[in-house]
Image (cartoon, helix red, strand yellow):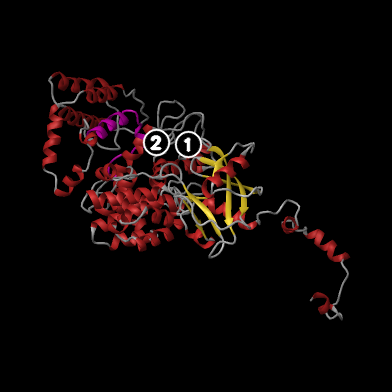
Amino acid sequence: MGRGLAAEVPEGRVLLQTSWFWRGGAGLARAGSVLAGVVRLTAWIGRSHAPWSPSGSWAREIARESIMKKPRAAVGSRSRCRKQASSQEGREKRALSSRQAKSSAPDGLARRQEEVVLQASVSPYHLFRDTAEVTVFRESLLSWYGREKRDLPWRRRAEGEVDLDRRAYAVWVSEVMLQQTQVATVISYYNRWMQKWPTLQDLASASLEEVNQLWAGLGYYSRGRWLLEGAQKVVEELGGHMPRTAETLQRLLPGVGRYTAGAIASIAFGQATGVVDGNVVRVLCRVRAIGADPSSTLVSQQLWSLAQQLVDPARPGDFNQAAMELGATVCTPQRPLCSQCPVQSLCRAHLRVEREQLSVSWSPPGSRDVEECAPNTGQCQLCAPPTEPWDQTLGVANFPRKASRRPPREECSAICVLEQPRAIGGPRILLVQRPNSGLLAGLWEFPSVTAEPSGQHQCKALLQELQSWVGPLPATRLQHLGQVVHTFSHIKVTYQVYGLALEEQTPVTIVPPGARWLTREEFHTAAVSTAMKKVFRMYEGQQPGTCKGSKRSQMSTLSRRKKPSPGQQVLDSFFRPHIPADAPGLSGATQ
């Protein structure tokens, strides 16, 4: 069935055609192709822009029946295709696990089944009318991209690299770094990474410690580990060659999902496959006025279907980058620059804004534009729910609908910066390594313990943790320095920060595995998280051992006092005695 096309399809007619094939015992592949032909024919005959809300039961029944049955013809066809694969594809398939190799249905067939069900529940209002409209969208977007695209290091590398594996590697690194991270932040990390590990082979020979050290501060640290593991797999199991298709990239490389696989395949290898990231979600939801939750299964499937329909087969990499560029620079979350949008004429969200501005003056009460999807009926699964009415102050930013997010889980931790001021070679601080799995896996941090929000018994537990690493410690009381709050992707951690300086202790030089003493300079280049850097800044700003009310604390408090208001400054200057600049003894008094 043509992607992105839906129309009124007589339910009885389609069921009559398909049931004949099932009674005759035809294979699933044959029935699927005829079903697609029938739907295309009826869509061509009955194409309409009128609101449409079918039950979709016929498509769901066909999809359910096709999934339950596993015709041998389809399996045989797949086997024949495998025998014709190239040597590169053979290497990729041999690397698959036995579980993956025994999958009962090809990905392409499953995708087609999903599209049949999806098209049955989507109004034509949210789709593109025909090929001509798709062509206009492609040409307009690519023309704009050629004029306005940003000069970014990963684009220069991809455009200038002839070797396909090196090109794919350069794209892969950039796409992983750009996940949940702004472009401005990524540029310096990307340049340092590619300078240190310019090829897959270079990265494969690196250690996790080196990767974490370079990645420190970029966040979402598992991404760096996945890049390392993926490079090692390509070198050791795939002969040093990157998988060439989005499907094999996603199956074979750890941490590579559907979006990253599509980006690599389209940009590096020219595969005509669409991509959907946060920027593309925003563009598509506005262009086709999709107001339902984009994180829902049905809406997500529709967005991927639209992306696949729109991607330019001649320039898939440029098109995908253009769509992402449009969302990042023009079709932004707030205050989008609609006047600069190359596809403004095709944007249903923009058309609705114009219609809303004119509706008061010329639209009769209760009238509905022919291009509007039946509102407030609850029948269209891509429209915003009736509980979320149109907000005129937002304009096109009514799309996409913001998904409700759960607040991050809150945790409390007691953490201590333990320092040896008189250590050989200069002052040193203790760091311990986190486990190799879970949050911040493999990174270094100050010794810490999980604490109760009330703070009871946390000092005793923290002291025991410190002693487990360095042995007996003096009875000196841990000095509480304050608290640091840091939010990770799904956890909000409040660190109660303590400091302890071993002033008169014999320097500790031997520590168990998983711990090390570092100088302050080494700390700033170590594989530590942003949260640990916050903790250390607090430690550096307050000398351990000082108490509240001490001279240092008082001076710090005075320095933080609010600056007098302009009126108060005028009064102060009025009552302050005037001393001429050339008064005798002034210079001596100030020395």
Q: Residues within 10 Å of mark 2 (few under 14, many from 20)?
A: some
- Dominant secondary structure of the residues highlighted in magenta in the image: helix
Q: Which residue is mark 2?
A: 371
- Residue 352: x, y in percent? 46, 40
Determine which residue is flagged by label 1: 403
Q: Mark 1: which secondary structure?
A: loop
Q: Is residue 573 left or right of residue 416?
A: right
Residue at x 49% of width, y 52% of height:
511
Residue 213 in picture, x, y percent from top left: 43, 56
The span picked out in magenta is 108-132
30 or 131, nearer to the observer: 30
Does residue 477 sit above or below 385 in this rendering? below
How many numbered tags mark residues here?
Answer: 2
On whether residue 119 falls in the magenta region, the answer is: yes
Task: Check the image and report above or below for 369 versus 498.
Answer: above
Residue 259 horizontal/vertical position (percent): 34, 44
Q: Amino acid at mark 1?
A: Ala
Which residue is situated farthest in the top direction here?
23
Instruction: Name the disc covering residue 304, or none.
Output: none
Residue depicted at 15% across the width and 31% down the height: 75
Q: How far separated are the C-alphas under marks 2 and 1?
A: 26 Å
**Image quarter for residue 552?**
bottom right
Seen from the viewer's position, the closer of residues 435 and 20 is 435
* Disc 2 to disc 1: CB gap under 8 Å: no
Q: Is residue 148 above or below residue 303?
A: below
